[in-house]
Structures are given as structure tokens and as C-alpha cells.
Amino acid sequence: MRIIASANNPGGANAILPLVKKFIAARHEVLCILEDKAREIFQSAGLAFVDANLVDFAEINKLVSAQKFDLFLAGTSLGLTIDKKILAICQANKTLSIYVLDFWSNYWQRFSRQQKDFAYLPDYILIMDDLAQKEMLAEGFPPTKLRLTGNPFFDDFASGIDLTQTKKNLILFVSQPMKDQNAVIGPQIPFDEFQALGDLIELMGSPKLQTHNLELEIRLHPRDEKHKFDGLMENLKFACGYDQLPDVKLSLARAGIIVGISSVVLLQAALAGKYVISYQGKNSDPDPLISNRLGISRLAKTKAELEVLLAEALNNRQKIIAHPPANVLVKDACAKAYALILELIKDYDQK
């Protein structure tokens, strides 16, 4: 069986990577065509790929059109990314197309142009759970396109985060490129990472919290520039630096408090039992962070609310370990998605 796999951003790449590995292990032929930060995800996994940032699209068109493929498998992204360009070719060639959704936000924006037109709808979208299905149907997605399998990346998502290594006074700020995202699709959250980190730094330097001898580390998003927040880190009254650990699980294990906006890393930390604060600013409805809705992370909409939650974490240590409800995520998502894809390919071939 011949498969094309494509992704642009880290979330989309992580969602399809377990499936790509499974297809390769089963001796199927997989042509991976990647751009931007998805390349680093697959490179770290030791998988070969065509670098769409370096290869002219005319050459990619030839590769995709040169032979018959059984499946186009892709991770979602915003904007006119390489996967959407390949999708158009595959649809013209009548190749089955399947996307894997990686998070509970920006549903229609992942499959539309500037307005909600669903211009980039594939044959099927594999989704995380009932909540994603409910919200996508409310946005107008055709129900026949949606298949509930879970996100394969979540299978081992929170395992291996050692809670015994926690440094109680260390706050980890998890960055995400909200400012850039807002420029592309408009502010789903009218707030960005610079505002969030600036408010956090201000509170950490306040007399009320200074007594805790706090330290701050900043975990950059894969798309962030290395010195993104240097301007906010000057002349501080507490230790502050960029997190240099190679694995985010090590970073989460070490931190006593995790603060961010709506990154998937906040869900990961909350599921592992860390004290997580999602600082989104005002007018953040609907809340894009699923762990807030599950009650395993805390939402702050104002700087005052953020200060209250920081104080709670610092003064009431017994509350730091959250207790995620059972079966938050679909179990064995990769196996479920793999089995379903094989069925869909078989059904598609018989049409």
C-alpha cells in the first residue's frame, strides 16, 4: 500500500507520527512531505521526508502524481500549508484523504480559507472525542466526515512525568505563538504570550510573592525565536531563564507550577497531576483548553485572578496534585485510528 503523509506544524506532525510509524512497521510505502516545524518532529523520530521548504512545489506535484497512492494522511494546520496543496492534487486523483485533528480549537479555521468555507475538507477527519464532535457539528462540519478515534499522540502523553522531582518554587511558563496566530486568523483569545508573561513576571516581583524565592523558566514553542522574550527578562528581582531541557516531560517534572495560555502542554501537565494555570485574559469564551473544562487546570481571566491562583499554589501545597477524571482521553487511539483507516481504504477501493 502506498501512502502520502504531510504536516506543517508540531501538533499536526505529532498526531500523525504514530500512524506513520505503524504503517512503515507494517511494510507499507510512506512518502512523507513536510514543511516548517513538522520537519523537526519527523527528523527527531529518524524518519526520511521530502523537505517542502526546499523543494519546488512543481517537483512535489510530480512526486504525488507519478503513481497511484492509496491514502493521503495529514495533520491539521492554519493557512495555505503544504498539506492543503497536496490535498487538492489527491482529490483530483481520487485518492482517499484523511486528516487527524490534534486539539479542541480552531476547528473550521483548519479546513477553510479566511472565511468559513470548508474549502479544504478531506474525505474524513479523525477526532479526539465526543466534545470535539459536538463542537464541530455545531460549526457546520458534515457529520459523515467525522470519525472518533482519539489523537494517537495522546496515547503516551502524560506518562513518564516524574512528580518526585518537583522544585516547589520553580514556575514554568509555556509559550505559544498566539501573537502570530492572531495575525493569521484573528484573535480567538484577545490576548497573547507577551501579555501573559509580562503579567506573570510583574506578579512574581511583587512583595506578596517575593517571599517565596521564586524562579521562572520559559519553555519556548518550537516556532518561537530563541531570544523571543529577552526584553521582558531584564533587571528582574528573581532568577529567570529559558528552559534548555531536551524533553518537555523533564521540564514539567521539575516545575512546581505550570503557567501558559492554552497550549497542549498545559493539558499534558494537568493529566500528569501538576498544578496548571491557564491565563487567557478577558473574553476567552469559548475556552479552548480542554483541561480547564475538565476541572484539572485552573483558568485565570485577569491578573488579579492569576495572583490568587499563584498564591493558592504556593501557600497550599496539598492542592498542587490534581486528580484527573478517569478516561479523559480515548485509550489506544493509534490502534483505533490505524484499524479504522484500513477499513476506510478497503471501503473506498470498493466504490
Image (tube, rainbow, N blue to C red):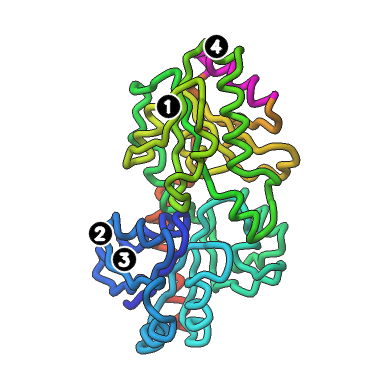
Earlier-in-chain disc, 4 versus 1: 1
Image point (37%, 78%), residue name = 55
Query: Where residue 85 sits in the image (x, y, percent)?
Result: 51, 77
- Magenta: main secondary structure: helix
- The residue mark sitting in front, 3 or 1, is 1
Distance from the alpha carbon under mark 4 to that under mark 2: 45 Å
Image point (54%, 68%), residue name = 124
Q: Residues within 10 Å of mark 1 (few under 14, many from 20)?
A: many
- Contact, mark 1 vs mark 2 (Cβ under 8 Å): no
- Residue 21 vs residue 187: left or right? left
Distance from the alpha carbon under mark 1 to that under mark 2: 29 Å
> Which numbered circle lies on residue 46?
2
Image point (61%, 36%), residue name = 196
Mark 3 element type:
helix
Distance from the alpha carbon under mark 3 to that under mark 1: 36 Å
Q: Which residue is mark 1?
A: 255
- The residue mark sitting in front, 4 or 3, is 4
Q: Which residue is mark 3?
A: 23
Establish if 38 lies above or below 193: below
Earlier-in-chain disc, 1 versus 2: 2
Establish if 166 lies above or below 341: above
Q: Residues within 10 Å of mark 2 (few under 14, many from 20)?
A: few
Range of residues picked out in magenta: 304-319
Q: Which residue is mark 4?
A: 315
